[in-house]
Amino acid sequence: MKIILLEDVKGKGKKDDIIEVSDGYGKNYLIKNKLGVLYTKGSKKVLDKELFDREEEEKALIDKLNKIKEKLENKEIKFKVNTGAMDKVFGNVSSKQISEEIKKLGYDIDKRNLKITENIDTLGVHKVLVELHKKVKFYINVVLEK
């Protein structure tokens, strides 16, 4: 019996996979628990349409995120910081602070999308990776000055 999975099933497959299972397992477990539906021409057509729609939504999202990338890529975000002896910065700049500064520019980027690889605790320019989507990544410059 062929089944189209509606959810991930451990050891069998991922959502939207078409798998071959025994009749009893298919009817009594997968279909009964709404983990899958019987594979027919109609259900295959519905699956194809769903996959196409998801792909189109993904393309639209990537286009939208690329427009944000074009505007923010290599942009400088400046922070005035207090320094001590020998220009040592007190504390460091966090992803939350960077996110708030980006919001002031009119872009809502979550702090979890900012990938900081090193502490931003010295004067000068620091590059921060912004990962809006697995296909849309770019750097912004964070500048610390007195």
Image (spheres, rainbow, N blue to C red):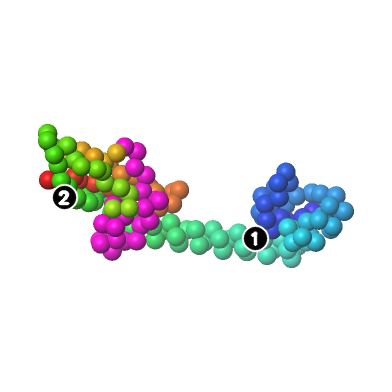
Task: Give how far across and how far down residue 65 sits, in percent.
Answer: 39, 57
Tell me the element at label 2.
Answer: strand
Question: Magenta residues?
Answer: 98-118
Query: Farthest right residue?
Result: 24
| Residues under numbered marks 1 and 2 in contact, where contact means CB atoms less than 8 Å apart | no
- Residue 84 tag number: none
**Residue 116 is a magenta residue:** yes
**Residue 32 is a magenta residue:** no
Tell me the element at label 1.
Answer: helix
Q: What residue is drawn where x is 20% and y is 38%?
A: 122
Nearer the observer, disc 1 or disc 2?
A: 2
Q: Amino acid at mark 2?
A: Lys
Q: Quadrant of residue 61?
A: bottom left
Task: Give how far across and how far down residue 26 sits, in percent.
Answer: 82, 55
Task: Give how far across and how far down residue 1 sits, in percent.
Answer: 83, 53
Q: Is residue 66 visible?
A: no
- Residue 48 tag number: 1
Q: CA distance from mark 1 to mark 2?
A: 54 Å
Q: Amino acid at mark 1?
A: Asp
Q: Is residue 91 above or below residue 33?
A: above
Relative depth, front residue between 21 and 46? 21
Relative depth, front residue between 129 and 123? 123
Q: Is 110 on the left or on the right of 80, as rendered?
A: right
Relative depth, front residue between 33 and 45? 33
Q: Quadrant of residue 4?
A: bottom right
Q: What residue is drawn where x is 20% and y is 42%?
A: 90
Q: Is 50 on the left or on the right of 126, as rendered?
A: right
Q: What residue is drawn where x is 19% and y is 50%?
A: 79
